[in-house]
């Protein structure tokens, strides 16, 4: 290994006590790296600040992408009091204290920006408790989540907040972070060119992880020592992902895993799952992909497939590595050996096309509620037949807009549980024809 600098030039580590990632937190939104679509000159948050009105927001993105930092900077840019809580460690009593403190501040003329980390961890009732203080302006809520808000947050909460997506940091952004770290530390990272690239791949788009790894390297290096890629992996006790810089390896392996599951080959599925885990792939990413496979390629041929995939993702989230990896393996085998059907997937795509084509049509009046006298006079709800009052609990009415006519999107195959669904649909179709005579 060639020296990049002499031993006499290597400065001692900064003895501030604070982690490097904390010391390098941006001081302004303009210093935030990797989220230019939000914090750049024409970014969404920049425009909000310039308008003088923030409104509540949900920050959705992977760990280490700057969600907490941006929330702090927003409070500073808008002169709001900053209050931070974590849904993991907070309960109802904590929320009440925070809300009361925010009300007192507002009475004294200052609003509070309340940052809630891992907001999806709050249950439905706890999420609902934010609604009154959001509506009356007591707080500007900024919630952070790594999970899809559409699935994890109440609709009422989402309707009062704007969702802003934080992106995984690309290689260029991570290079910038490391260069800034070297500038602050006053010394280069003791890595050769290949090892530097490996460290960035190890970080997997997580800015905080890249700085933590850099700090580990500085601590481990002796005066004048420069690590190559193999030495780096020994020092930080972490394997580098085998994927190439263009991420072709990543996409090739996930494609191979997906097609092995679709092709009902549990052995191949296990092989590619193991390869990706061994390469350092984010296990929760694999969990999400297994959920997608269950919905796309198995569907209602085995309704338990989606349940098993979701349970595996949650099990890994609960157990972590390496124990949780077995749950992902179990899900991969279950999905590979389950009967296959893309009937719901195909039906949903067809329904989406129809929705775009006929999206302006009103539903037929007989299935619309008539809560007012005027609506009753306009025949809303007239002629509706309550299915539970009909023979077989089936009225056979047409629910599509009149100009569309009845449509067929879902065509279940004669496989797995969908064989039973097809029997039901055929039976109802037969009843419908008999009643239309």
Image (cartoon, rainbow, N blue to C red):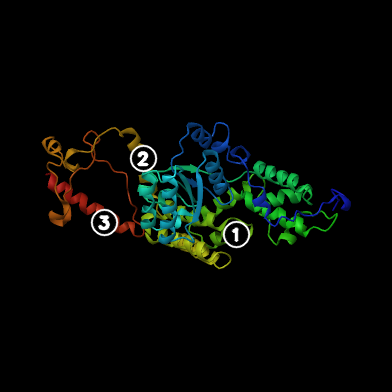
Q: CA distance from mark 3 to mark 2?
A: 25 Å
In this figure, which residue is indicated by the disc labeled 2? 352
Viewer-side residue, 257 vs 170: 170
Which quadrant of the figure contains the C terminus? top left
User: Label 2: few (<14), some or many (≥20) within 10 Å?
Assistant: some
Badge 1, how many Cα within 10 Å: few under 14, some, many 20+? some
Mark 1 to mark 2: distance in Å?
35 Å
Q: Name the residue at 27% across, 41% down.
A: 407
Q: Secondary structure at mark 2?
A: helix
**Residue 277 disc label:** 1
The mark closer to the camera, 3 or 2, is: 2
* Location of residue 182 in the rendering, given as x and y in whole percent from the top left corner: 75, 46
Q: Position of residue 309 (x, y in %)?
A: 45, 60
Provide residue 347's location: percent of width, then percent of height: 35, 45
Task: Please tell me which residue lies in front, 332 or 180.
Answer: 180
Q: Position of residue 259 (x, y in %)?
A: 51, 53
Instruction: Say whether marks 3 and 2 touch (CB < 8 Å).
Output: no
Q: Which badge, 3 or 2, comes first in the chain's sequence?
A: 2
Residue 39 showing in the rendered view? yes
């Amino acid at each position: 290994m060639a020296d990049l600098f002499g031993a006499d030039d290597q400065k001692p580590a900064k003895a501030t006590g604070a982690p490097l990632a904390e010391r390098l937190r941006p001081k302004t939104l303009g210093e935030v790296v990797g989220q230019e679509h939000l914090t750049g000159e024409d970014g969404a948050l920049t425009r909000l600040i310039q308008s003088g009105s923030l409104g509540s927001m949900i920050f959705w993105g992977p760990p280490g992408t700057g969600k907490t930092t941006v929330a702090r900077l927003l409070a500073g840019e808008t002169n709001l009091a900053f209050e931070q809580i974590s849904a993991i460690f907070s309960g109802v009593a904590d929320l009440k204290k925070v809300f009361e403190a925010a009300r007192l501040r507002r009475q004294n003329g200052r609003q509070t920006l309340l940052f809630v980390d891992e907001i999806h961890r709050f249950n439905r009732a706890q999420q609902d408790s934010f609604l009154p203080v959001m509506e009356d302006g007591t707080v500007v809520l900024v919630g952070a989540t790594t999970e899809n808000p559409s699935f994890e947050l109440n609709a009422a909460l989402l309707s009062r907040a704007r969702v802003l997506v934080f992106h995984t940091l690309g290689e260029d952004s991570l290079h910038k972070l490391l260069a800034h770290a070297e500038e602050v530390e006053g010394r280069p990272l003791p890595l050769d060119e290949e090892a530097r690239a490996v460290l960035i791949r190890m970080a997997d788009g997580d800015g905080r992880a890249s700085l933590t790894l850099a700090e580990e390297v500085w601590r481990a290096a002796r005066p004048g020592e420069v690590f190559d890629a193999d030495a780096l992996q020994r020092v930080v006790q972490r394997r580098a992902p085998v994927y190439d810089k263009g991420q072709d390896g990543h996409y090739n392996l996930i494609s191979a895993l997906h097609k092995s599951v679709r092709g009902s080959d549990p052995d191949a599925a296990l092989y590619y799952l193991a390869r990706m885990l061994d390469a350092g792939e984010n296990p929760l990413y694999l969990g999400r992909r297994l959920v997608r496979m269950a919905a796309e390629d198995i569907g209602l041929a085995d309704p338990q497939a989606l349940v098993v995939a979701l349970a595996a993702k949650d099990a890994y989230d609960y157990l972590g590595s390496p124990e949780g990896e077995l749950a992902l393996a179990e899900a991969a085998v279950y999905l590979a050996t389950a009967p296959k059907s893309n009937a719901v997937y195909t039906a949903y795509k067809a329904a989406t096309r129809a929705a775009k084509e006929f999206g302006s049509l009103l539903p037929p009046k007989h299935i619309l509620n008539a809560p007012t006298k005027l609506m009753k006079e306009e025949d809303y709800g007239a002629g509706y037949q309550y299915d539970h009052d009909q023979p077989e609990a089936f009225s056979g009415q047409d629910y599509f807009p009149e100009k569309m006519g009845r449509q067929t999107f879902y065509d279940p195959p004669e496989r797995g549980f969908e064989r039973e669904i097809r029997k039901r649909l055929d039976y109802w179709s037969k009843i419908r024809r008999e009643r239309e005579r």
